[in-house]
Image (cartoon, rainbow, N blue to C red):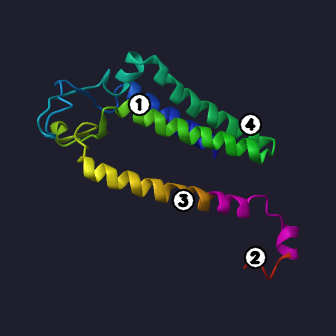
Amino acid sequence: MGLVYLATFLAAGAWLYFGGIQGYTLVTPFDTNGVANPLAKEVLTNANPGWMNNYSTYPITMAAPIAGILGGLIIVLAASKNKAGLSFLGSSLAVIGAILTAGFALFPFLMPSSINPVASLTMWDAVSSKNTLTVMTVAACIFVPLILIYTTWCYYKMWGVITNKHIEDNSHSLY
């Protein structure tokens, strides 16, 4: 699976780099203290720099695709040596690297529109009122720890390798 991830991750990166998908650049300066108007902006569509612009402007962002590739390599090497913990670490690094790579490439766009680039949702269009943000912060403070506790409990309960012997020994309790 690590090889499939590496192949698709690198192919998608090459496709973007060589202009296979038209990139967007936000041209209009924005007022962060003004009223949000998603259609009051100018978007330039171009093949390059487009999605690759942030990587040349902010070289530190190159750490994300490097982490994604490194994670994929760790997956392949760890799986070939039957190292479950290292494989988990590699897959975690690959997922984080892939998500950050997409986020850095898209910034400031959150949801680019291929039909009308001006209608693309940017970071500054996706804002909310102070009251809404306060309610969501309280909800996040309550529910994120619950989700983390539940996820940790699930990992604890399901951790380990299931063998034929384990299934035979626990034939009534595993189903």
Q: Secondary structure at mark 2?
A: loop
Q: Position of residue 92 (x, y in %)?
A: 61, 43
The circle drawn on residue 40 is none
Q: Residues within 10 Å of mark 3 (few under 14, many from 20)?
A: few
**Rounded to the nearest whole Å, what is the CA distance between mark 3 and mark 4?**
31 Å
Left or right, 91 with respect to 113, comes to right
Give the magenta-colored segment's residue range.
Answer: 152-169
Q: Amino acid at mark 4?
A: Leu
Quarter of the image for residue 43 reads top left
Q: Nearer the viewer, mark 4 or mark 2?
A: 2
- Judging by the rendered image, the residue that carries numbered circle 3 is 147
**Rounded to the nearest whole Å, what is the CA distance between mark 2 and mark 3?**
25 Å
Q: Nearer the viewer, mark 1 or mark 4?
A: 1
The circle drawn on residue 174 is 2
**Rounded to the nearest whole Å, what is the CA distance between mark 1 and mark 3?**
26 Å
Q: Secondary structure at mark 4?
A: helix
**Mark 2 or mark 1: whose residue is earlier in sequence:** 1
The circle drawn on residue 104 is 1
Q: Main secondary structure of the magenta part?
A: helix
Q: Amino acid at mark 1?
A: Phe
**Mark 3 or mark 4: whose residue is earlier in sequence:** 4
Is there CB contact under 8 Å for labels 3 and 4? no
User: How many marks are shown on the rendered structure?
Assistant: 4
Quarter of the image for residue 44 reads top left
**Mark 1 or mark 4: whose residue is earlier in sequence:** 4
**Mark 4 or mark 2: whose residue is earlier in sequence:** 4
In the depicted view, which residue is nearer to us: 30 or 72?
30
Q: Position of residue 76 (x, y in %)?
A: 70, 39
**Rounded to the nearest whole Å, what is the CA distance between mark 1 and mark 4?**
27 Å
